[in-house]
Image (tube, grey):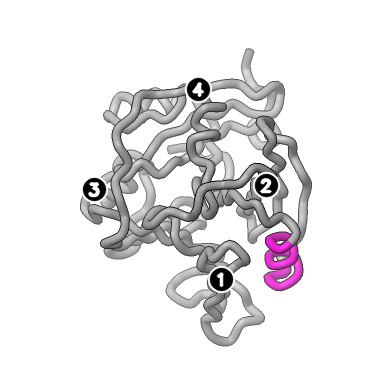
Amino acid sequence: MELAKRFVDVGIFTNRLDEMRAFYGERIRLPYEEMLPVGKGVRQYRFGMLGSVLKINHLRDPLPARVAGGYRKLSISDPRTPMPLPMQDPDGNEVELAPNGQRGVNQIEIHIGVTDEAAFENFYADALQAQRIGAGRFKLGETIISFRHDPAAVRARKSPTAGAVDVIASMRAVGMRYITVQVRDCDGEHRRFMSMGVWEGAAPVTLGAVARISFIRDPDGNFIEISQRASLTGPIPA
């Protein structure tokens, strides 16, 4: 997979905008970048995270509660931290500041609770072509993705492909709900995923002059956005 950016982004949904901005911007001290209106009542507040982007998607309408399993913890490398510092954000998401280089984390690590570790090993090695660095640990660019069996995790019911707007609506719940991988060619990568039998979330769609995106789903149904962003790859082809 040809990456356009060697860092994976993380998407969170919340109703607690002020508390979340204070936690990530003031307590964690991530630099605020911008706000983007996503549509359907969603505003996305973006924070820099060592090359990744933390995307805090805020809705005024009440969100369903956090679900078990899935994207369960975010570790952020911090040279100011002498030992791992576990904490929770205002929504109860697990966040850890980790000493730079500990466990090989020099950027961020995304932790996933899964139903079947072997299925995820195959998915990240073959479909996402990530570098295996240990049992249940892969490196996608500079970002580490790790997973372990979680008895509370539930595999989503297989559903047909949907439009990108419907996919975004379906993932709405409190917590870390998706990751974004920036690629050079969204359509080419999406065709490759489909040829491998990867679960399709949404076929590629163009978002104005900003990006072309699609969604795939991992073996448990967690969403992964595949994005070709014009600011990284140049103008989006017509």
Q: Which residues are magenta?
A: 19-29
Mark 1 or mark 3, which is nearer to you? 1
- Kindly state the secondary structure of the residue where label 4 is placed: loop
Q: Is residue 111 magenta?
A: no
Q: Position of residue 198 (x, y in %)?
A: 31, 32
Under mark 4, the amino acid is Gly
11 lies left or right of 221: right
Q: Is residue 6 above or below residue 87?
A: above
| Label 4 crowd (10 A; few <14 / some 14-19 / many >=20) | some
- Depth check: 186 or 33 in front? 33
Q: Name the residue that disc number 3 marks.
A: 119
Q: Is residue 53 visible?
A: no
- Depth check: 71 or 170 in front? 170
Q: Name the residue that disc number 1 marks.
A: 88
Alpha carbon distance from label 2 to label 4: 21 Å
Q: Name the residue that disc number 4 marks.
A: 163
